[in-house]
Every structure is written in structure tokens, then in C-alpha cells.
Amino acid sequence: MSHLPRFWNLGWSSFLDWWSNQSVVSEQGPSPLYGQQDMNEPLLDNSEGQLFLTEAFKVIIEEVLCKGTDVKEKVCEWREPEELAALLDLELRENGEPQHQLLQRIRDVAKYSVKTNHPRFFNQLFAGVDYHALTGRFLTEALNTSQYTYEVAPVFVLMEDEVLSKLRSLVGWAEGDGIFCPGGTMSNMYAMNVARYRAFPEVKLKGMWSLPRLAVFTSQQSHYSVMKAAAFQGIGTENVFKVKVDDRGCMIPEDLGETIELAKSQGAVPFFVHATSGTTVQGAFDPLEPIADICDRQGLWMHVDAAWGGSVLFSKEHKHLMRGVERADSVTWNPHKMMLTGLQCSAILLKDTTHLLKHCHSADAKYLFQQDKFYDTSLDTGDKSIQCGRKVDCLKLWLMWKAVGSKGLEERVDRAFTHTRYLVEEMQRREGFELIGKPLFVNVCFWFIPPSLRGKENSPDYNDRLSKVAPVIKERMMKQGTMMLGYQPQGGRVNFFRMIVISPQLSHQDMTFCLNEIERLGNDL
């Protein structure tokens, strides 16, 4: 019993005496246990906290939203890790800090963070800011509820249902199911898990012991989350069969058919085909109609990862890129990418109307999902999710959609394509820019060939030297803070740039600047 508190064996009156003495202030200061507190007063001062929040918002607006969107300001204020850690003074201490020092902390965090809202941030599949969505994000944080039951999130249960229904209608489904997830990787994992449950429902009770060797099919350029999902769910990465792609990065349906037969010949049981609408690097769209034909013949679940490309469905001009998506069983769509809702906002959409999502994931927690509640318990959607607590991700999308309408979102998609065409035309006019194919989407992939390498494509060390160009230019642009865009190798291609053109803050001047800046930073290489 020695591990128990020393008052455990005291009499009741002795315990009360001990307890009351804990709040007595000694000459040396307050008790380290409770300090000098009036237990009839709240621990936190709302008025003081609200004043701090008001001042903090002023800093956020000035440093993040004003300076962070100004082309005259830097995209990033690069510091080496050791220097940055010292500047931020990251150590957590026993005592708190005064308000003015905390406000300086906020300024420092903003100053040394990458400004993803900046017009010259081309680095990721998200960029720019929508102020209505941002307002929704602020409101979500302030309300601080969990999206699992109607009793704690009545507004958001109804709102999520409406938003998901509208997204499904764009896919082409009058009915269906879905849920918001913490990112596209999780949405893709949901799809694979539900597909396996449909094919082998006993897996939920008996586990992998009850299953044959399963086979998943995806393209060579699909997102790495397919491999993660196979590993996470015990299917195994060796059982993910990679299907060949053409020069544009699109899956070759004929090879899909042959790969399925190959898997069968090896004793594997196919159950899931993962197609992509908008690959991460090249922005390729797999041909969904012929893939759907194969899935129908083979009885396979067809999933479309449209995390990146799904927003083309808003555009009458460009939705043809996803022709046949209505034939899929499930779709991943990340509005936090091209639709600019802000991180994170990802939906898994299902055509299914038999509640597979809930049957697959439910654990029937009695303390949360009581069936004798005073309202319709079908509104308690949390058991569809593998999470318990689940962040509200629908409000920012709903508020933005309310503000600009479907037409406004269509305009954003079409404008991004227009900017992309302009950028490609500008590159084709300049010496030293070599495109990796004509873009299908808003991913512009290219090499910059510095003067020292032009005309030397047949030199034995050409590829080795070219592979070093993009990393050096990237380092220079970040250290000078002028802009950001990504690079990567792919297959047999050495490092090349990938420029993502989606921000509504973008102008043709920004893209011209980008090309000029690459030339300035790389001409001496």
C-alpha cells in the first residue's frame, strides 16, 4: 500500500484538515498543489482571454493574411533548424508568460512559417486562401465539438449530410453514403476496407485468418496511400499489383486486364481496383469507362481517387476528364485542394445504399450510441467512422459554397486551366524550358536546362548534371524567399519541376515572374 497517497489511511476529519490546508498560502508562497485560488471563481478569465484573442487576430490578419498574400513580401523566411529553434525559444517551462510576450510568439510563428497563401507558392496541391472558408475554420475551432452524434453536433450532422449529398450528385449518384475523413489517405483506406468487407464480411469478426490472399490493382503513378492502406490493413504491399501507364501517366486498361489474370494465376483473389483522377505529379486522369468495364466483368470494387482532380466535376468544360466516374463504387475527393477550403477537408463518397460503411466500422459503443434516445438515432453518424472524436470538416466547405455558389467554384476551376495554358505557352516561347508532355490538368512538369547543358543531350553525364539543377534552384529560391515550387524524379526521368497552378490570388504576372526567377537562379549552373 506504500504507493498510495499518504492521506489514504487518515480518518475522514483528518483528511478534511489535510485538504483544507492545501490552499493555505505559506510564507514561501502558494502550495505547489493548488496555489492561491478561490474555488468559487472560474480558473480562466474569459474577459482576459477574449482580449488576448482580439489582439492575436490583429496579428494574424496583418502577418498571415496581409503580408502573407503580398507579392512584395517573401514566401518564406528560411532559417536553418538550429537557428530557427533558438529564435522561437521552443522550450516549455514551469511558469507562464505575459500576454505581450505571447503575442510576440504569434508574430514569430507567422514570420518564420511558409506563406501558403502567397501568390508565388506553387509547391503543393493546395495554395491560396478563401476567406469564407477561413471564417468557417475559425468558427469550427471556436465551437470545438465532435462530429459523432446529433446531440453534440446537431448543426453539423445535418450540414455534413447536405454537403456529402451535393458532392455525390456531382459524381452522378442520386443516393449513397459517405463521411468526411482526416485526409485523402484515410479516405482511400476507408474505400479499401469497405471493399474488403463487402467481399468478405467475415473479416470483421475473424480477421485475416479467414481470408485468401487478396490482390489490389492500381497504376504505377497512383498515390502512395494505396501501399500504406495495404500494409495497414494486413493485405501486404506485395499484393498491390502496379498497372502500367502511358506517357501521360494514365493507367493502360489492357494492362489492368492482363495484371488481374496474372494475379489470379499466382493464387491471389482480386477484389479492389484503385483508379486515379488527377495523379500527384503529372495530374493524369485514368480512363474510367474501360476500367469500369473490367471491374464489372470481374466483379471488383472500383474506387476512384479524385482527391486532387475531383473538382473538375464543377466545370462543364473539363468534367469530361472524369467521364465514367458514376460507375465507380467509391470516390475520394479533397476539397481542401483545388476548392481552397483549407486543410483538412476530405470526403469518402460511396454509391452503396445498404449501410456498408457503418456495418464495416461500427463498434456499437453503448455510452455514445444509445438506441433509446429521444431523437432519431440514425442521425448519430459517428459509428460509420473508425475514429471516435471527429473534427467538423463540413462547415468551411458549406460556408464557402454558400458564398460563391457552384458557378463560382466552376469559375475557379476554369481559371486555373486558363492560367495553366498561359504558363505552358510562355514556356514554349523560351529557351531552356522543356515540358514533360502537354499537361492534362494544372500540374505543369518541366526541366529547366541551363545554358551550360543546352545542346549536350547526348553527353554521357547529361542526365547526372541535369538532375542537380532543380535541387540547387529550389535551395536558392527558398533561401531568398522569392517563391516555392516542387521537384522530383519519376521513373526514368531525373529531377524535374512540378508547378501547381490553382491559387485564386494568381495573375499572369506571377507566372511570368516565376519563369524569370528560374532563369535568374539557374542560368549560372
Image (cartoon, grey):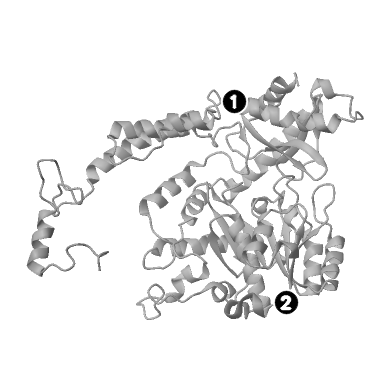
Give the quarter of the figure containing the C terminus: top right
Label placed on residue 136: none
- Determine the CA span between mark 1 and mark 2: 53 Å
Mark carried by residue 212? 2
Q: Which residue is mark 1?
A: 479
Q: Specify which label sits upstream in the sequence, 1 or 2.
A: 2
Q: Disc count in the image?
A: 2
Q: Amino acid at mark 2?
A: Pro
- Residue at image position (58%, 47%) is 339
Report the front residue among 369 and 260: 260
Amino acid bearing label 1: Lys
**Up-down relation of residue 67 to residue 343 (above or below):** above
- 254 vs 415, left or right, is right
Q: Is residue 40 left or right of residue 214?
A: left
Q: Residues within 10 Å of mark 2 (few under 14, many from 20)?
A: few
Image location of residue 251, percent across then percent down: 80, 56
Where residue 8 sits, quadrant-wise, is bottom left
- Secondary structure of residue under mark 2: loop
Residue 103 visible at all: yes
Q: x and y percent of residue 294 in the render?
A: 81, 68
Residue at position x 20%, y 51% in the image: 33
Q: Residue 383's spot in the image, x, y percent? A: 49, 71
In the depicted structure, whether residue 312 falls above or below residue 55:
below
